[in-house]
Image: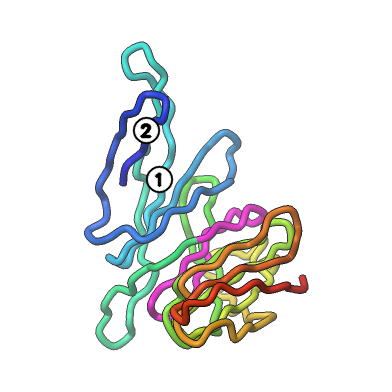
Amino acid sequence: MALWSLDLCKTTSSKQHSNTVTSLVSINSTPKNAHYLCSASYDGSIGLWQFVEGCRGRRPAITIQHLLSLAHGSYPITDTPVEVLCLASHDASACVISGGNDAVIRCWSLSRKTRMQKVATLSGHTDAVTCMKVDQGQDLLFTGSDDGTVLQWDVRSIVGLQKDCHAEIQPVGLVGAHDGLVHDLAVAANGLRRLVTCGADRRVCLWEYIP
């Protein structure tokens, strides 16, 4: 991972993962003025990082400090780590959401002591979860998958969940989006309630969704 300073044209780097880093997401969390980042990797882990302000000589500088790593999950028979393919964050619950090639979505709560604990599992896809985005204004999560579908989830239900409660959350909507893999998706800003998806069928699709 590399942190870039656009003003100084310099980078600082840190290596904690043992395989390709697939996704990054910033987290709005408590305490105030603390800035966190999560990383996902093919090595099956999710890393938690904190931005640290300091000085480099006489100039102010920001670095990233690795705080912890945790496993997204493993396959029950072989115990092989599940590759983590995508991440998203939900501001209202201070949760990080991860998706991997086991078709399962997991929600992780970031506590005040900078610990991450699993609070919920979202099941509905039948193949690898490749992309996800949160509509923060509507508290909706959208996930795309190699199964060709996009699922809509009401993530208000994860607010206030306690650690290890093992809540099972079901989707509230399904879009048969593409004839093949869903590669990426985007949520329109400013409450437009529009979703854009793209897939292996070479199509870009615009959808209207209902909260």
Query: Which class describes the residues within 10 Å of circle 2: few (<14), some (14-19), or many (20+)?
Result: some
| Residue 67 in the image: above or below residue 156 | above
The chief SS type of the magenta part is strand
Residue 110: image location, x then y, percent:
52, 53
Region in magenta: 88-107
Q: Tell me where residue 158 sits by quadrant.
A: bottom right
Residue 163 visible in the picture: yes
Marks 2 and 1, how far apart in space? 10 Å
Residue 86: image location, x then y, percent:
44, 65
Q: Amino acid at mark 2?
A: Thr
| Residue 167 in the image: above or below residue 180 | above
Query: Which class describes the residues within 10 Å of circle 1: few (<14), some (14-19), or many (20+)?
Result: many
Q: Amino acid at mark 1?
A: Trp
Q: Residue 24 versus residue 10: which sits nearer the camera?
A: 10
Between marks 2 and 1 in the image, the one whose residue lies nearer the viewer = 2
Q: Residue 91 versus residue 175: which sits nearer the camera?
A: 175
Asked if residue 14 is among those painted magenta in the image, a careful observer would answer no
Disc 1 is placed on an element classified as strand
Q: Which residue is mark 1?
A: 49
Residue 104 visible in the picture: no
Q: Tell me where residue 211 sits by quadrant.
A: bottom right
Q: Which residue is mark 2?
A: 63
